[in-house]
Image (cartoon, rainbow, N blue to C red):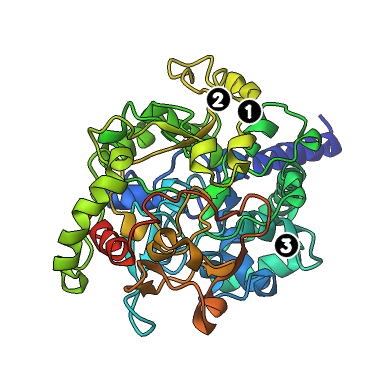
């Protein structure tokens, strides 16, 4: 073998090694599974990194290099999209994973939130509550925007990575220059193309997600022929044991908690092949009996709440209390009269195709169905599940019980609690500054319907609101 052939063979081998290291880089490698289930829930992988993961050294610097592409919301870097940094490390955000050097998303992305007692208070992190500040669509749009920016080039990004980590080696720099940065651009561009259906629908905003339109794309539906808006509020994860056998998802399309969990993980970016079943099972077991935090007793008007219990039982209990015939059952759209778009989005054809997912695995989906309404669910921790209705179109419990007070426009994503109305402050200059505008006139955002108990005397309705805080 002559010298030129030997050199060419060496170069080919080196390039192959570099290309292979794109997904095997030890930088920021995933630590062993956390002994603490809380840490596992917050940071453990469920298998999303392969399809939607971003290389960690690159992910770490994107909010710095492209700060102007982030929304003008409070916080630093990724916090401006709703990610929660609990202070354990500058680059660790609840709901993000780091496996084989790639940052993915997990259950906590959608099911961890914060609350403040007043504007001067520090936020308290609550696991299992809806991630009412998390802008998932905003995250996808941010990644799409940065890879098209002229600053998304090797020189700029590698300089930023060296600044963030002076130990970023010569080998790492070469790897990222030749392979990781170009491949990341290509992969994000593919995701952008797959998400083109975003542009035909109103923005989702924080605390909401369109769960099933991505499945249509995954299953080969023609998204150009589909204009449905499936955007819905992120739900809580508390007390899943009592939900087994109830009809789940907002439209009651599945009655198996385990199927619901796996479909959520795949919706977050895992694939049937990459799904980490052991990790997901650990989380599934934990949320079976995870309890919501109690409403602060010092803030509860106990006597009013006690008075409200009887009115609640008469107006609300038959649909929402465990052990009653209607809990976990579907209320027809003709009766509940809430916005129908989410219901329209989950079609009979999609239900059939959902039951083909995982066909090579013992856990293949089998229980998806099409319904004609929305499910009545238990109200545990309802005080922390604002905004209300399936699409998050009603900001507070008071607005729910007093429909004439439901605002046409409000702001989602502010984490200061409204102790009088029951929900997060959604109007005023601070809410406008920290939140994202929500317009109930847009498709899928309607705030009508669910008028149960709203004809009762005002005092009874106020008592029901107080009682709801105790659930």
Q: Nearer the viewer, mark 2 or mark 3?
A: 2
Say which quarter of the image contains residue 204: bottom right
* Helix, strand or loop status at disc 2: loop
Q: Is residue 435 above or below residue 312?
A: below
Q: Is mark 3 in CB contact (under 8 Å) with mark 1?
A: no
Percent across and percent down for residue 258 are 38, 28
Query: Which residue occupies 58% across, 37% down?
Result: 343
**Marks 3/1: CA–CA distance:** 34 Å
Q: Earlier in the sequence, mark 2 or mark 3?
A: 3
**Marks 1/2: CA–CA distance:** 6 Å
* Helix, strand or loop status at disc 3: helix
The residue to which callout 1 is attached is 347
Instruction: Determine if residue 34 is in view.
Output: no
Dot 1 alpha-carbon crowd within 10 angstroms: few under 14, some 14 to 19, many 20 or more: some
The residue to which callout 2 is attached is 370
Q: Earlier in the sequence, mark 1 or mark 2?
A: 1
Q: Which mark is residue 146?
A: 3
């Amino acid at each position: 073998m002559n010298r030129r052939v030997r050199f060419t063979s060496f170069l080919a081998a080196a390039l192959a090694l570099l290309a292979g290291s794109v997904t095997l880089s030890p930088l920021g490698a995933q630590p062993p599974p956390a002994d603490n289930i809380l840490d596992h829930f917050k940071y453990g992988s469920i298998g999303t990194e392969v399809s939607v993961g971003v290389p960690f050294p690159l992910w770490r610097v994107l909010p710095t290099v492209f700060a102007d592409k982030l929304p003008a919301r409070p916080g630093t870097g990724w916090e401006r999209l709703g990610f929660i940094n609990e202070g354990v490390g500058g680059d660790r955000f609840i709901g993000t994973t780091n496996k084989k050097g790639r940052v993915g998303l997990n259950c906590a992305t959608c099911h961890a939130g914060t609350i403040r007692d007043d504007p001067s208070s520090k936020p308290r992190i609550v696991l299992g509550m809806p991630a009412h500040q998390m802008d998932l669509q905003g995250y996808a749009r941010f990644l799409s925007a940065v890879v098209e920016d002229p600053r998304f080039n090797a020189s700029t990004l590698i300089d930023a990575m060296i600044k963030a980590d002076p130990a970023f080696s010569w080998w790492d720099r070469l790897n990222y220059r030749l392979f990781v940065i170009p491949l990341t651009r290509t992969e994000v561009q593919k995701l952008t193309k797959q998400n083109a259906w975003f542009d035909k629908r109103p923005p989702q905003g924080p605390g909401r997600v369109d769960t099933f339109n991505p499945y249509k794309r995954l299953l080969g539906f023609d998204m150009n022929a589909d204009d449905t808006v499936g955007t819905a509020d992120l739900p809580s994860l508390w007390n899943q044991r009592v939900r087994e056998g109830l009809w789940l998802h907002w439209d009651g399309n599945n009655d198996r908690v385990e199927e619901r969990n796996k479909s959520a993980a795949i919706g977050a970016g895992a694939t049937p092949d990459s799904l980490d079943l052991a990790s997901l099972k650990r989380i599934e077991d934990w949320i079976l009996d995870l309890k919501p935090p109690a409403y602060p007793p010092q803030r509860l008007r106990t006597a009013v709440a006690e008075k409200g219990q009887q009115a609640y039982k008469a107006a609300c209990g038959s649909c929402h209390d465990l052990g009653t015939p209607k809990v976990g059952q579907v209320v027809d759209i003709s009766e509940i009269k809430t916005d129908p778009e989410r219901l329209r989005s989950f079609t009979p054809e999609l239900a059939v195709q959902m039951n083909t997912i995982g066909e090579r695995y013992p856990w293949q989906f089998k229980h998806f169905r099409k319904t004609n309404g929305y499910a009545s669910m238990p109200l545990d921790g309802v005080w922390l599940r604002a905004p209300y209705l399936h699409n998050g179109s009603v900001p507070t419990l008071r607005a729910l019980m007093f429909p004439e007070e439901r605002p046409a426009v409000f702001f989602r994503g502010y984490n200061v609690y409204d102790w009088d109305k029951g929900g997060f402050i959604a109007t005023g200059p601070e809410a406008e500054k920290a939140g994202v505008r929500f317009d109930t006139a847009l498709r899928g955002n309607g705030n009508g319907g669910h008028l149960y108990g709203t004809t009762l005397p005002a005092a009874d309705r106020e008592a029901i609101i107080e009682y709801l805080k105790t659930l």
